[in-house]
Image (cartoon, helix red, strand yellow):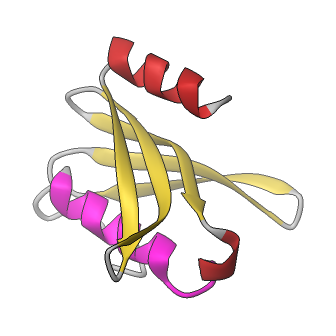
């Protein structure tokens, strides 16, 4: 999906496109599809040279603060397997291990 398609999709749905910055410089972004209960992290991208520095985990922690009453979900690939990660952000809920 191109950037234009992502922003067009976001304009027509309950979608947030959030920038990820380091020292004031853009290094990535995330696309979150949402409803009243849940948020699906459709896309999370970090610039190649800035990967494995904790920026993705920091972005997840900030989303947990920004959306305190939603369960956040994200699929990711590890070792050829497609896995689902759920992050519960409500009061008394389970937290992502890196939070």
Looking at the picture, how far across and down is residue 14, in whole percent? Answer: 30, 22
- Marker count (numbered): 0
Q: Tell me the quarter of the image containing the C terminus.
A: bottom left
Locate residue 59: give its quadrant. Answer: bottom left
Q: Residue furthest top?
A: 12
Instruction: Name the residue furthest front.
Output: 25
Residue 8, compared with residue 94, is above or below; it is above
40 is within the stretch colored magenta: no
Q: Quadrant of residue 31?
A: top left
In the image: residue 76, left or right of residue 72? right
Q: Which residues are magenta?
A: 51-66
Instruction: Tell me the quarter of the image containing the N terminus.
Output: top right
Q: Nearer the viewer, residue 56 or 19?
A: 19
| Main SS of residues in magenta | helix
**Percent of width and height locating residue 37:** 24, 33
What residue is drawn where x is 47% and y is 77%?
55
Residue under the point 53% across and 28% down: 6
């Amino acid at each position: 999906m191109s950037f234009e398609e992502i922003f067009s999709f976001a304009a027509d749905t309950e979608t947030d496109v959030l920038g990820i910055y380091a020292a004031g410089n853009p290094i990535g972004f995330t696309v979150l599809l949402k409803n009243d209960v849940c948020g699906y992290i459709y896309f999370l991208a970090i610039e190649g040279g800035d990967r494995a520095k904790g920026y993705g985990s920091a972005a997840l922690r900030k989303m947990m603060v920004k959306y305190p009453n939603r369960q956040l979900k994200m699929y990711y690939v590890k070792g050829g397997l497609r896995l689902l990660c759920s992050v519960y952000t409500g009061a008394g809920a389970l937290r992502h291990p890196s939070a």
